Amino acid sequence: MLAAMPAMQPIDREMMQRCIALSVRSGREGEYPLGVVICRAGEVVAESINRVAHERDVTRHAKVMAISAAQKALGTVSLDDCRIYVSAEPCAYCCYAIRESRFGRG
């Protein structure tokens, strides 16, 4: 049996709106329109847009960049007390980074 999805909280709406605004900015800057926000206790820890085109580096996915920034900001690889908000379904590469970072809730 599948577990029920937790109800959307006001913070979820706020972070998704921020995430979508980032994706719009990303598209305007010539990147794929992707945005990511990582927060802990309702505070933004890191956010990113895609940087593949600008940096000419296929590893500069928004999710991976935001995870890296959050880990550096918090001084840990485990983000189990954080939430990640994304504007599009993660690719396999980003899924691996998300899984290995052990987010408490995505």
Image (tube, grey):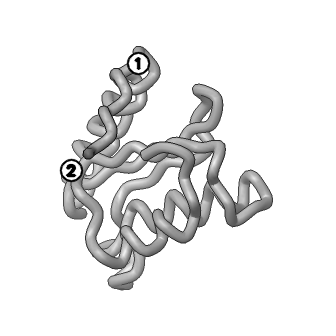
Q: Position of residue 79 (x, y in %)?
A: 63, 54
Residue 44 vertical position relative to residue 75 in the rendered view, above or below: above
Q: Is residue 13 left or right of residue 104?
A: left
Q: Position of residue 86 (x, y in %)?
A: 33, 48
* Sequence-first disc among 2 and 1: 1
Q: Position of residue 77 (x, y in %)?
A: 69, 65
Q: Is residue 81 left or right of residue 66?
A: right
Element at label 2: helix
Residue 64 vertical position relative to residue 86 in the rendered view, above or below: below
How far apart in space, not on screen, are marks 2 and 1 (Cα)? Answer: 29 Å
Residue at the image point whose x is 56% and y is 38% from the top: 39
Q: Position of residue 87 (x, y in %)?
A: 26, 46
Q: Is residue 76 left or right of residue 90?
A: right
Q: Residues within 10 Å of mark 2 (few under 14, many from 20)?
A: few
* Quadrant for the N terminus in the image: top left
Residue at the image point whose x is 38% and y is 70% from the top: 94
Residue at the top extreme of this rendering: 10
- Badges 2 and 1: C-beta atoms under 8 Å apart? no
Residue at the front extreme of this rendering: 1
Name the kind of residue labelled 2 in the image.
Arg
Residue at the image point whose x is 20% and y is 62% from the top: 32
Question: Residue 43 versus residue 23: which sits nearer the camera?
Answer: 43
Location of residue 54 by image quarter: bottom left
Name the kind of residue labelled 1 in the image.
Gln
Q: Which mark is residue 28?
A: 2
Element at label 1: loop
Location of residue 4 by image quarter: top left
The residue that label 1 is drawn on is: 9
Q: How many marks?
A: 2
Residue at the image point whose x is 30% and y is 36% from the top: 21
